[in-house]
Image (cartoon, helix red, strand yellow):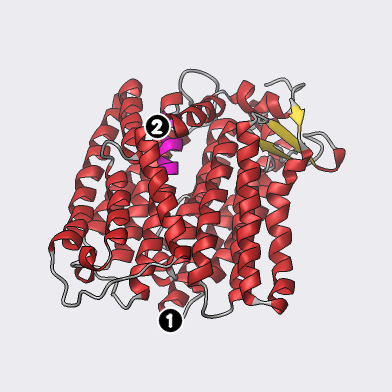
């Protein structure tokens, strides 16, 4: 297993630049926003370089202390695809912010945004369960403040609800970490995974439940996702795009890295260690998340709240995919996560442009948008059709893989097929209703919406990517399959890559 210590810059650069932002802010607020763009541009192209040159998998050894005695970052196929995703979405939102982030404290907004992205990448790459808690706190503190940013008072209520729920989740997670540490005396994920059989079964099961409960807050799973609708609706649209397109990515990674690597066993399907099948528990939570999220979205008259509930439902589908435990299921989970992140981030950004021209957030306010802005109408439609899972759009392949994985697994997972179809039908009602209003209804005013270059660039980039994935699924499919292989091969895919000399017990 090779080391590549320079990759520590993936975490260090955004956090360092975050705390340097006030210095640039003294010169110019606009400079602070451009520094954010340049920092995340570096993140994206560095992560892309790691992928294109097949440098992964590798360890970053901190302080020359080899794990498990020292801290490490691990960048494997699963982490690589999600770091590329997070940095790309972050870069696109930072470009959008050149236009949108003009009210309030712009400098502190840029600082918090970089903290959030850096913390999310840290969550994905760290090899230590306590450091996961540290990065949860970094992303948490920055996201609470970002959610409260903006002129509307409703932002404060959503941010406070997020603060309370997330703090409870972090505390539960920390108690789970404490129980594991008292049993094994180590915090390294790879060593814990290799020595998991040395623990007391009942105590480990309880620790697993605490970890799942804590991480389900970040992954937006029922019943720990009550903060999502109010937080997404109250925040300014770039923040809603950030939470949906970036925040949930790190939470999902950590949840299933721990479930499938720490608690999992090698084999055709991943099972769990202990008295309770934690993967089945997550499957149940994911199924409930889909049903509640979709029905709640269907009942909404506010587009932004509808997108928030839709985000919950999409994360439920992601969780179901991973919970199947097979390579195909994990492949579907990764693919679905990528499609959700890209499409939902784009749709929140589009809504931000629409609202900035004095148009409301209600579904009725979308009537006749085609006559005002064909560009925004077409791009919103692209995102909607992808989330519906129609052919020639990215979401088709991930939903197809999810159904295929459910069929292969069999048993009660046949029920998942019905859930996927149910989700698609309900989504068709509320997304096509909005799209229909946009194309067919005549607006009272036909004043044209002229979209500036800065918000247009990320919207166009997201749209092209959605269609490109739909036409050429191998863009995401290849690395998603490698990620799935690593995730389901506990010892060979992760443990022995981090600690080559360890022997599993």
Query: Distance of mark 2 from mark 1, alpha carbons?
Result: 42 Å
User: Which residues, given as a range, are shown in magenta?
Assistant: 329-339
The reply to whether residue 221 is visible in this rendering is no
Q: Is residue 400 left or right of residue 489?
A: left
| Pointers 2 and 1 in contact (C-beta within 8 Å) | no
Label count reads: 2
Label number found at residue 262: none
Q: Is residue 422 left or right of residue 222?
A: left
Asked which quadrant contains residue 1, the reply is top right
Image location of residue 48, percent across then percent down: 60, 40
Q: Residue at x 45, y 28 (%)?
A: 325
The reply to whether residue 433 is visible in this rendering is yes
Label number found at residue 153: 1
Prevalent SS, magenta region? helix
- Secondary element under disc 2, as helix, strand or loop, is loop
Q: Residue at x 35, y 65 (%)?
A: 351
Image location of residue 108, percent across then percent down: 63, 73
Q: Residue 415: within the magenta?
A: no
Identify whether 48 is placed above or below 146: above
* Residue named by callout 2: 473
Image location of residue 358, percent across then percent down: 32, 78
């Amino acid at each position: 297993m090779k080391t590549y210590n320079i990759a520590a810059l993936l975490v260090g650069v955004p956090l360092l630049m975050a705390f340097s932002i006030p210095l640039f802010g003294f010169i110019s607020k606009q400079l602070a926003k451009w520094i954010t763009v340049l920092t995340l541009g570096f993140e994206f192209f560095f992560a892309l370089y790691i992928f294109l040159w097949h440098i992964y998998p590798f360890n970053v050894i901190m302080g020359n202390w080899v794990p498990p005695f020292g801290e490490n970052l691990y960048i494997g196929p699963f982490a690589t695809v999600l770091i590329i995703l997070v940095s790309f979405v972050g870069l696109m939102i930072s470009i959008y912010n050149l236009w949108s982030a003009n009210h309030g404290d712009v400098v502190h907004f840029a600082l918090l945004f970089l903290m959030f992205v850096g913390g999310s990448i840290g969550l994905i790459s760290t090899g230590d369960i306590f450091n996961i808690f540290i990065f949860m706190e970094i992303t948490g503190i920055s996201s609470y403040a970002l959610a409260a940013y903006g002129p509307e008072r409703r932002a404060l209520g959503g941010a406070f609800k997020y603060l309370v729920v997330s703090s409870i989740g972090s505390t539960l997670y920390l108690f789970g970490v404490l129980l594991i540490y008292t049993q094994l005396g180590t915090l390294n994920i790879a060593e814990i995974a290799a020595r998991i059989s040395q623990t007391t079964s009942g105590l480990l099961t309880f620790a697993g439940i605490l970890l799942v409960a804590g991480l389900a807050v970040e992954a937006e799973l029922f019943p720990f996702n009550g903060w999502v609708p109010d937080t997404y609706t109250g925040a300014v649209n770039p923040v809603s795009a950030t939470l949906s397109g970036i925040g949930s990515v790190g939470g999902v990674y950590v949840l299933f890295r721990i479930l499938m690597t720490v608690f999992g066993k090698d084999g055709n399907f991943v099972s769990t260690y202990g008295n309770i099948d934690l993967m089945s528990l997550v499957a149940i939570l994911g199924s409930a998340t889909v049903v509640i999220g979709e029905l709640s979205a269907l009942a909404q008259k506010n587009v932004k709240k509808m997108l928030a509930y839709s985000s919950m439902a999409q994360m439920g589908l992601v969780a179901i995919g991973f919970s199947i435990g097979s390579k195909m299921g994990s492949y579907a989970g990764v693919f679905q996560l990528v499609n959700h992140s890209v499409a939902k981030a784009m749709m929140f950004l589009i809504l931000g442009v629409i609202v900035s021209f004095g148009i409301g957030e209600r579904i009725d306010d979308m009537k006749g948008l085609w006559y005002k802005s064909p560009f925004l109408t077409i791009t919103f439609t692209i995102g909607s059709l992808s989330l519906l899972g129609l052919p020639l759009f990215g979401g088709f392949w991930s939903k197809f893989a999810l159904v295929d994985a459910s069929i292969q697994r069999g048993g009660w997972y046949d029920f998942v097929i019905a859930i996927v179809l149910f989700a698609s039908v309900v989504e068709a009602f509320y997304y096509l209703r909005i799209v229909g209003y946009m194309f067919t209804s005549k607006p009272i005013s036909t004043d044209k919406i002229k979209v500036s270059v800065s918000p247009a660039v990320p919207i166009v980039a997201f749209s092209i990517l959605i269609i490109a994935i739909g036409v050429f699924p191998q863009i995401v499919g290849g690395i998603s399959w490698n990620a799935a292989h690593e995730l389901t091969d506990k010892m060979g895919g992760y443990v022995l890559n981090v600690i080559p000399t360890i022997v599993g017990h």
